[in-house]
Amino acid sequence: MLLGLVSCDKFLDVMPDNRTELDSADKIRRLLVTAYPSVDYLYFNELMSDNNENLGDNNPYTDVIFDQIYSWSDVTEDWFGCPAWVWENCYRAIASANQALLTMEEKGGAEALDCQAEMAEALMCRAFSHFILVNTFCMNYNPETSETDLGVPYMTRSETTLNPKYERGTVAEVYRHIDEDIQAALPYISDAYYKVPQYHFTKKAANAFAARFYLFYEKWAEAEKYADAALGAIPQLRDLKKFSTITRDFDAWCDQFISPSEKANLLMLGANSIYGRSYCVGATYCGKYTHTRYTANNEDFYASNIWGGASYYMSPSQYSGNNYDKVTIWRINEHAKIVDPVAETVTPFMFFPALTIDETLLVRAEARVLLGKYEAAAEDLTLWMQNNVKTDMVLTPEKILAFYEDPIVKYDDDGNPIRESKYATWDNSTIKKHLNPSFYIGAENGLRECMIQCVLGFRRIEGFALGLRWWDVKRYGIEIWRRTMGSNGAPARLDDMLLKDDPRRAIQLPREVIDAGLTPNPRNK
């Protein structure tokens, strides 16, 4: 018996498998590579937004999952980029971050291992994945409702029990936890040990994420503060003029857009995905729901805009013909990731910029509008505009107001002015839609609201194919339509409408998660 106990003790002194013990800063760094979510949340963000129309019988190429996502239905399919993948991959990344933090704690703290920078990276990664989760599976942050709106479980420890039970908490609780992690991380973020900085939370990337988070959290001063830190004195915007010198080729343009050498790309992520073959190129694959010429001509790229007839440096591409009608920008390509070199099997893979200097500039512009700093906001908007389109125009609050407010076109019999509304309707698209945020933006056609319209219009172009428009739709309570396009390319039938407080703005939890005991998102009967 004594021999058996001694033998057992010796056996337990040995790792039961080939996992590496995390006993150094270097090993923790290697673990943190897996603390970034490797998942495509762009596809369903784009499909749910107003960037897409239903081509109806004009294009038969679709699948059940695309039908469900486009119609804001509960998703039952399991495929690349489905909500279940986002849930699983984000929590897997969070588990890696938590394991790194737990190891530091068990070894006497980050200072004992001389890995304060690694601690900061783990906290930022944990905050970032929870940010994606809460903005995917929950209603947008709203100080009037978020104390009761269902959140997602905020995981701060690695799971050690079998079949644990979790509570969703509230959106407000998730935002408070993200806030705490960001504040704990920022003082210790370091760029010192990154070989390829764009794949990590550098100081610029961390501040850019903080700026976006506080914008969503409705803390405008903090959003401006962290945007300032990310942008620096002279923002290094994407060199869009370079695209005028590159051969107009899909692969070449996409490679340049996602290049780690592009200083505007602050944080690059990768994911198994078919997004590149379907959204940023003119293929008919899954082409039933797409960004049409009608949308481009009336709502974004080619719509009458404040810069007049100036053209883009990185111009959109148009595709038309039998079965499809599409306008897109060459940004995201598909790569082949080797799964088994012996069997020569591969899986589709993509890289995309999750945080950029250009978007952060528009985060600051929006925060400045909401702080009442209209002149400074106009300067940011001018900088973005002149980098994207060939114009020397300088924007001012007065010019923005004059362009976006509704014009007086005639007078009634009593001499009262009648305005012709620029706001879009389901059968008449424009660049301007009614906004219904929880925060104050002033009266419609007022200076504050018009400047926000300008910011959102620029953000829609900047965030095209990057999933940002859907989050703006949620934040500003923008009501959007589902309409079938006719053979002439214009809206022919109204099929559905997403109202400002529609519960479908929160994607339903994966079925497996609900079956495990988590409360599902409410749905209208």
Image (cartoon, rainbow, N blue to C red):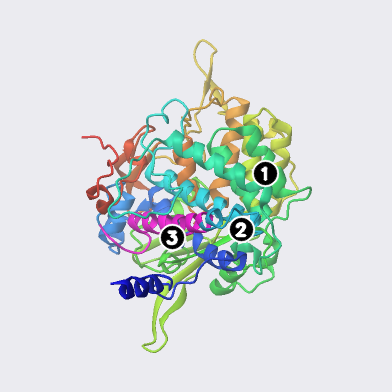
Between 392 and 33, the one nearer to me in the picture: 33
Q: Where residue 506 sits: x, y (%)?
A: 36, 42
Labels in figure, total: 3
Query: What residue did someone put label 2 on?
Result: 118
- Is 88 contained in the magenta span? yes
Is residue 458 something one can see in this rendering? no
The amino acid on which the numbered mark 1 sits, given as a three-letter code, is Ala
Q: Are marks 2 and 3 in contact (CB under 8 Å)?
A: no
Spatial CA span between label 2 and label 1: 23 Å
Q: Where residue 375 sits: x, y (%)?
A: 73, 33
**SS at mark 3 in the image:** loop
Query: What residue did someone put label 1 on?
Result: 227
Q: Are marks 2 and 1 in contact (CB under 8 Å)?
A: no
**SS at mark 1 in the image:** helix
Q: Determine whether 266 is above or below 459 in the image.
A: below
The amino acid on which the numbered mark 2 sits, given as a three-letter code, is Glu
- Mark nearer the N terminus (2 vs 1): 2
